Amino acid sequence: MIDREQVLHVAKLARLKLSDAEVERMTGELSNILEHVERMDELDLEGVEPTSHVVELQNVLRDDVPRESLPRERALEGAPDAADEGFRVPSPGAP
Amino acid sequence: MSADLLGLSADAQAERVEAGELSGEELFGFWRSRADADDLGAYLWVASDNPGGTLPPVAVKDLFCVEGVPSSAGSRILEGYRPPYTATSVRNLIEGGARVLGKTNQDEFAMGSSNENSGYGPVQNPWDRSRVPGGSSGGSAAAVAAGSAPWAIGTDTGGSIRQPAALCGIVGLKPTYGAVSRYGMIAFASSLDQCGPLTRNVADAARLFDLLRGPDPCDSTCVGIEEALALPRAERLDGLRFGVWGFEEEGLDPGVAEVCRAAIGRIEELGGGVQDVELPDAGHGLSAYYVIAPAEASANLARYDGVRYGLRSPVDGDLTALYEQTRHDGFGDEVKRRIMIGTYALSSGYYDAYYGKAQKVRTRIVENFRAAFEQVDFVVTPTSPTVAFKLGERTADPLAMYLSDYFTVPMSLAGLPAVSMPAGLSQDLPVGLQIAGPAFSEARVLDAAHALEAAIGFEGVPRP
């Protein structure tokens, strides 16, 4: 179960602003989903190794050969506010 | 020429171009006018030029980056974004002679089973316009079923190719994880996402998959498949063993079960052996999936912050306020839900209880399939527990929507190839049968599906 305070905490971690109505709705919906997910507790998983990835791969290496990368102007083309060859944002400490 | 082309497989159309009976430009132009006339909401963008091609053009799910072409993954947060590069899978198609016909509608960031989570409006099912086409590759499936595209590609994370293929009465293949490059696919859940074809028949699926696949230096998880893939030719299923799973599931619609059982009867008529098979932990697949996929998504979607591309909301405050407001304004409800679940499941104190546990369930499911494939060559299930449902029917209940993926999620967690093919009609709506095989057994899966396809003789044409 998840309460309002937890929803607000998680939203902060996710850098996601939620309206009051969204917080309200999310509290119920997330609780329902987590309740379903918690059915995993029915399984005895003692000693089972976790799987993060299904393809068995060792490190994939290639020769370190210099090659062209995306030109700076192309990389900046999609930016909402590009300036001085970079992405312009408000100061992290702005009021 | 026109009606003629509509009835031909993609392969047969290519043969006509090769024989000089029509030009690549004529073929492209034919399909472009069909795509332009789409009124199901299947397309978000249609090509305005005519690049021709030696193969029929391909409708491409919006989340594939195509250089200079709007690629928004169905999200308002990427509205107007035109990538500076093209996805490897799409580049493989273009190099193979199949050009991009258009970008198809989808659930936002591929999160959904009905296409109703698109930031650009829903898609209607061509079999019944009051119903969903499935999702998340709903636009691709609807376009192929309605004949506004000769074939299409989509992506499948927990069923997003197979389920819409089933609901629209077409063929959809989710390849083995690692068979097709993910480079340039706007990411949802990186350990599960895989690109694959949606087509009107099994041979076309094999042909398109053959173009898509192959290792890629830009995706180190993509190992490709070494040998050439022959087009499926099988007419019989003698000596092959099919393991049936999932018919005990209580959410399975009786009409869907009946159609699928009839198709399994055809397998026996073709000489295939049919037996029940146990996947004891697969019923917990959905629970594991709805932790793992949101967890990976919450990390992947951190990049949408109003700085490098897409939407930026105007704010008075600091950088954090910019992030929070942009993400509030740009993401839809389902995406926000999944970011929240994923962030919660990965947060301090909850990791072991959710993410760690889900990864262990995933191991169990991998082992279940390994054991099953010691007894049988294929696992057969219904693709979707129901036929296409009504628009709006499940939007208020996220959990009911998630249950659409019950039969497709286990194969995704185990990284296995699986095809959905039309098995017949129930309530005048298409029913899909899923055939899954061991890793990298695409050729065998498609061969079996090809034999069964001929025996079923599905008329792949929606009502007008």
Image (cartoon, coloured by chain):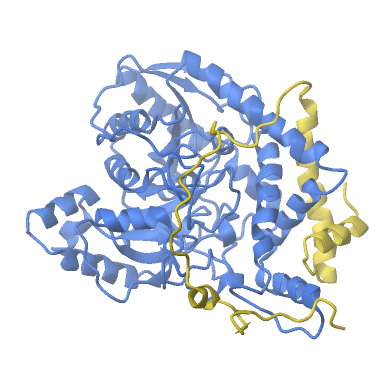
* Residue A45 position in % (x across, y down): 76, 24
The relative height of residue B344 versus residue A37 in the rendered view (above or below) is below
- Residue at point 32% right, 54% down? B93
Residue nearer the viewer, A58 or B13: A58
> Picture quarter containing residue B337?
bottom right
* Residue B432 position in % (x across, y down): 44, 40
- Residue at point 58% right, 38% down? B409
> Picture quarter containing residue B462?
bottom left
Residue nearer the viewer, B42 or B377: B377
The quadrant of the picture occupied by the N terminus of chain B is bottom left
Q: Is residue A40 left or right of residue B430?
A: right
- Residue at point 58% right, 35% down? B252
Q: Is residue A55 left or right of residue B296?
A: left
The relative height of residue B393 versus residue A57 in the rendered view (above or below) is below
- Residue at point 37% right, 44% down? B213
> Picture quarter containing residue B280?
top right
Q: Which shade of the palette goes to chain B?
A: blue
The quadrant of the picture occupied by the C terminus of chain B is bottom left
The relative height of residue B256 versus residue B306 in the rendered view (above or below) is above
* Residue B240 position in % (x across, y down): 36, 17
Q: Is residue B71 left or right of residue B295?
A: left
Q: Which shade of the palette goes to chain A?
A: yellow
